[in-house]
Amino acid sequence: IRSGTAGQPVLHFPSGLVGYPSAQRFVLEQGDGGVFELRGVAENDPDFLVVAPSPFFPDYAPVIDDETVERLGLRGQEDALVLLVVTLRDRPEDASANALAPLIINARTRDAAQVVLTGQPFSLRQPLLAS
């Protein structure tokens, strides 16, 4: 276990993240303005920059399928914390968020999943900053 994770609640992604199926345990470190760092607990797990959608995409309202709601034990909207994985590029203004595959976290149980939305008009590379 990496240092700096003591006492922080661990989020559990039983299916891992897209491209990282074995990375299943993370801690969420809050930054400023809806920006967070999702840090892998195991030594070789990746770290991700993630954002709460509302400061960047106020109209973002994905529909979560019943299977995911059941699998994560979500009782209502208040249980669900939705985060988007950010891809940084050479120029900060080119950063984008993956609005097509949000992270859905049950704030009560800390079970989580990355959900690929189907039939919804979201982008894999949604520009983070307005041009």
Image: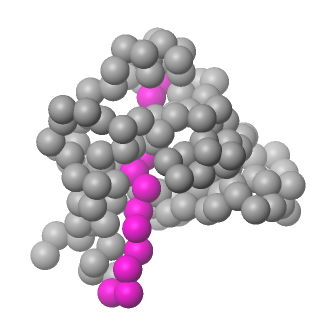
Picture coordinates of residue 66, whole percent (x, y): 37, 14
Horizontally, is 107 left or right of 11 in the view? Answer: left
For the point 76% across and 53% down, the residue is: 41
Quarter of image, res 78: top left
Q: Is the magenta region chiefly helix, strand or loop?
A: strand
Q: Residue furthest bottom?
A: 90
Horizontally, is 125 left or right of 43 in the view? Answer: left
Q: Can you say which quadrant of the picture contains the N terminus?
A: bottom right
User: Which stretch is magenta?
Assistant: 79-91
Q: Is residue 82 magenta?
A: yes
Quarter of image, res 81: top left
Picture coordinates of residue 87, whole percent (x, y): 40, 68
Q: Can you say which quadrant of the picture contains the C terminus?
A: bottom left
Picture coordinates of residue 79, whole percent (x, y): 48, 23
Picture coordinates of residue 25, whole percent (x, y): 70, 44
Question: Image height check: is 83 above or below 61?
Answer: below
Q: Is residue 48 magenta?
A: no
Total labels drawn: 0
Question: Image height check: is 20 above or below 62?
Answer: below
| Most foreground residue, 23 or 26 | 23
Horizontally, is 115 left or right of 118 in the view? Answer: right
Quarter of image, res 16: top right
For the point 41% across and 36% down, the residue is: 115
